[in-house]
Amino acid sequence: MNPIKAFMATLFTKTKPTKMKVDSIYNIKINAINGTPIDLSQFKGKHILFVNVASKCGFTPQYKDLQSLYDTYKDKLQIIGVPCNQFGKQEPGDANTITSFCEVNYGVSFLITEKTDVKGKHQHPLYTWLTQKINNGVKDSSVKWNFQKYLVDETGNLVDYFYSATKPESSKITKHLN
């Protein structure tokens, strides 16, 4: 195959993450947006809501609702925003741009991670755990778009996932926090 055809073939090939066993969610390594490692085990005893976020998406106003949810339940909930540029290239910014955008426009005070792949060949181990039943023990899923949410309970078990259209303060989520 000539090099141009080979290159074009790679552009249109969908890659699936390898099925692999990942230890407890508390052992997964991920960095905050400033590069500092986040120790997920510090959140034992709290629910964790992981949300893949983007600054140029129709769902971006959910940052406000996520902050409100965090303010209401911060004694029993940690929200972790995971910037991702895999859906419509809607998170093009670097760490400083993303941080500034979240703080200035939405007053975000919950954790934001480094920009991360949530699907595909380079899927971060966090999302390998969240999306594969072999790891989370509950169900397989795939991340469909920005602002998809994954709720983990206070003992590190996957509760469920919620598509982008589910508002952060929906009873589908809050019923697990009350």
Image: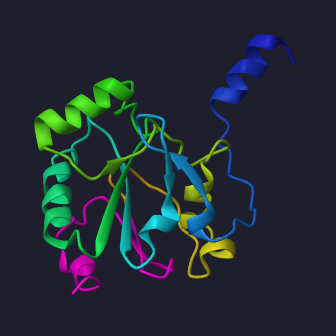
Quadrant of the rendered image containing residue 97: top left
Residue at 74 percent of width and 67 percent of height: 21
Q: Nearer the viewer, residue 59 or 26?
A: 26
Residue toward you, 97 or 143: 97
User: Where are the magenta residues, as a range?
Assistant: 149-178
Residue sitting at 70 percent across and 65 percent down?
A: 22
x, y percent for residue 162: 35, 69
Q: Quadrant of the C terminus?
A: bottom left
129 sits left or right of 40 in the view: right
Q: Quadrant of the N terminus?
A: top right
Looking at the image, residue 163 sits to the left or right of residue 35; the answer is left
Query: Is 71 rendered above or below residue 36?
Result: below
Position of residue 128 in the picture relative to residue 20 (left or right)? left
Report how many numbered discs are placed on residues in the image.
0
Residue 124, percent across and down? 60, 49
The question of residue 154 being in magenta is answered with yes
Q: Using the image, determine if residue 160 lies above or below residue 99.
A: below
Picture residue at 53% right of the left edge, 67% below the top: 141
Compared with 125, 73 (above or below) is: below
- Residue depicted at x 21% and y 43%: 58
Left or right relative to 141: residue 160: left
Asked if residue 45 is among those painted magenta in the image, a careful observer would answer no
In front here: 11 or 55? 55
The image shows residue 163, relative to residue 31, as above or below, that is below
